Amino acid sequence: MDKLIDSDSIKEFRRLIEESADIVLTCHVRPDGDAIGSTLGMMHLLRALGKNVTVIIPDKAPGNLSFLPGFKEMGVYTCHPEFCKKTVESADLIICCDFNTPSRQDSLAPVIQGATCRKVLVDHHQEPDNFADLMISYPDMSSTCELMFRLIAGMGFFAELDESGAVCILTGIITDTRNFFVNCKHHDLYEILIRLLEKGADKEMIVKEALNTRSYWSLKLEAYALSEKLEVFPEHKAAVITLSKDELTRFHYEKGDSEGLVNRPLEIKGMVYSIFLREDADCIKVSARSCNGFPVSEICKNLYGGGGHLQAAGGEFRGSLEECYRKLVEAMPDYDRYLKNQKQ
Ligand code: 5GP
Ligand code: MN
């Protein structure tokens, strides 16, 4: 495997782990498979090393990840704030996984940022804020889980990674690459897959549970969104889907039900980017995907103060769904310049 991670970072990470007895792992709000996979995967590894480890997450994780070993043990800040605060305060080390700026932790951010112990960031998002003592940021990685695997192997802890840890880490790789469909050009990723299969991770089960299992209403919502709410802008090679609170209620919306919807318009031949606007409790949640190197992260950053990855990004808009939509459509011509080199 190529040595892509700076050896000083690996040494420093190992030293911080060895010096710590109580370790907290944490991730971003509305956690996905990579956020939960990387925190729980590292939890299993650190427990095998004899550490006292707790995963603290900002809000509830989606039910389709409940098959992950350790899922029920996670401390959810919105449910048990006092427990989470106490655990963070008594930690010797906090490992921040899969986010690049404190605000991605919502109301948990001040708790984590206020902790006086040392912090490590392990992440693959662009342009991280410098908020940890040790910043391990590799935006070229497919997933935080791939990065975590490389760190575990680099620190010499591969033997301690058990089946539970392997299942968690493979889940993050599978969800962030959509089962080796995007961001998986580097051949090392397949070697990592082999190592995780050898540890006993069941790929078929993970793909079924994490990617291909949904509720009846989630499927109906996607069918409705595609048949009634998909709008295509051929001159900009763009597609937009909007869903209002009323529409979501009509389909008995639950968190995670629209996961994956934003990818669907990219199946249309010639489509380069897709943006999904969902009316949430206190904001419009923006979710964006693109192909062929179109920088959809720029749109999320410039219009909605968000970010993420070049081809998978998001943001939040304070205002009405209509305003959010208008802002996007009016800005589309500004991004036509990135379409020039698009392959068809
Ligand atoms: P998703 O569309 O799955 O919610 O998010 C896609 C990517 O964009 C993820 O990597 C996520 O971390 C990032 N992202 C989503 N929402 C936001 C946001 O509000 N702010 C920033 N900075 N990144 C986001
Ligand atoms: Mn990720």
Image (tube, rainbow, N blue to C red):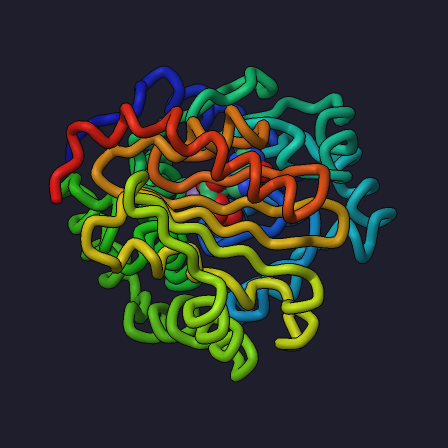
In the displayed image of the protein, which residue is found farthest to the bottom? 216
Q: Which residue is drawn at 51% across and 24% down?
A: 302
Q: Which residue is drawn at 56% across and 16% down?
A: 130
Above or below 344: residue 241: below
Q: Does residue 43 appear in the picture of this structure?
A: no
Is 327 on the left-hand or right-hand side of 269? right
Q: Where is residue 322 in the image (x, y as percent from the top left)?
A: 64, 47
The image quadrant of residue 61 is bottom right
Q: Residue at x 50, y 46 (%)?
A: 287
Is 253 on the left-hand or right-hand side of 314? right
Above or below 26: residue 127: above
Q: Position of residue 71 (x, y in %)?
A: 59, 63
Nearer to us in this view, 247 or 213: 247
In the displayed image of the protein, which residue is found farthest to the right? 82
Is 281 on the left-hand or right-hand side of 238? right
Q: Does residue 261 appear in the picture of this structure?
A: yes
Above or below 90: residue 169: below
